[in-house]
Amino acid sequence: RDGDGRLRDLSWVPDTDAEVQPVTADSDDGRSVIRHSAAHVLAQAVQALFPGAKLGIGPPITDGFYYDFEVAEPFTPDDLDKLEKRMRQIVKEGQLFSRRVFESKDEARAELADEPYKLELIDDKSGADDPEVMEVGGDELTAYDNLNPRTRDRVWGDLCRGPHIPTTRYIPAFKLTRSSAAYWRGDQNNASLQRIYGTAWESQEALDRHLELIEEAQRRDHRKLGVELDLFSFPDELGSGLPVFHPKGGVVRRELEEYSRRKHIDAGYEFVNTPHI
């Protein structure tokens, strides 16, 4: 981080003497940079395997990252396997992340003429303060190019304010987890895109721990346990999220309600009733 608290690339050169703070890979900020870079690698892989794909946004999020794409068909589990394989090839190549400043909006528009969603971000900077819009922000429009480490030729690039890790080799552990539909910029009046989610960590051990926690949470999912233990069900006639308690579930619910009632009374609370909707 620089003196203003802004995250910077390792290649950043300050104009004057400046105090900086290191950011470690296992910190929240470090993981965020790794995940943001992994999102770029994902986008590069998608456009390599699906040449007609148009790019949306691809931010880091809690415990992972995602990227939105306009594609002809939804992604399948087999597609995710192929994309993950292509990503591993890109990581192994050690492509360099190189920051480049556009001289003007017109230059950016010309370069990204085939990317309608990027053009919208260039022309509408109202989303610059949105933490999930990593493409624009600040006083400059910048791109990050992925360069061949031997020839320095540009392999792929994206509109982005950064920062990024120095090379793709700094993404030691990642996994694509799922895909879903998502409205552009979260607005149901906009186009429906395909979103791919993934997770990336500073080590294979950290990734394994995260995946174990996810598996444990799935094993403890109340929707799964409710069916397995014959506690409740969700009839289609009533709609999703509306449980019908079976006899066993009724016993569990009654005991929990009684426990809660006793605790409230012991704590000095009095019960009242309000209109039930």
Image (spheres, rainbow, N blue to C red):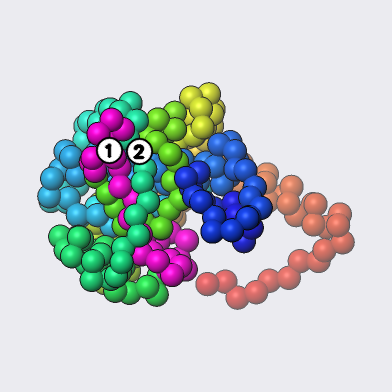
Q: Residue at x 37, y 43 (%)?
A: 97
Magenta span: chief secondary structure? loop
Q: Position of residue 144 (x, y in %)?
A: 34, 50
Q: Residue at x 20, y 61 (%)?
A: 112
Element at label 1: loop
User: Do residues under tags 1 and 2 come within 8 Å of each other at their CB atoms?
Assistant: yes
Earlier-in-chain disc, 1 versus 2:
2
Magenta stretch bounds: 128-155
Q: Position of residue 78 (x, y in %)?
A: 21, 32
Crowding near pointer 1: few (<14 within 10 Å), some, many (20+)?
Answer: few
Q: Position of residue 148 (x, y in %)?
A: 27, 35
- In this orientation, does residue 273 appear? yes
Q: Nearer the viewer, mark 1 or mark 2?
A: 1
Vertical position of residue 120 compared to residue 77: above or below: below
Q: Which mark is residue 152?
A: 1
- In this orientation, does residue 81 appear? no
Q: Foreground: 176 or 91?
A: 91
Q: Position of residue 198 (x, y in %)?
A: 38, 40
Specify the amino acid type for callout 2. Answer: Leu
Residue indicated by mark 2: 96
Q: Foreground: 168 or 102?
A: 102
Q: Foreground: 256 or 128?
A: 128
142 inside magenta stretch? yes
Question: Residue 249, located in which quarter of the rendered image?
Answer: top right
Q: Residue at x 40, y 61 (%)?
A: 133
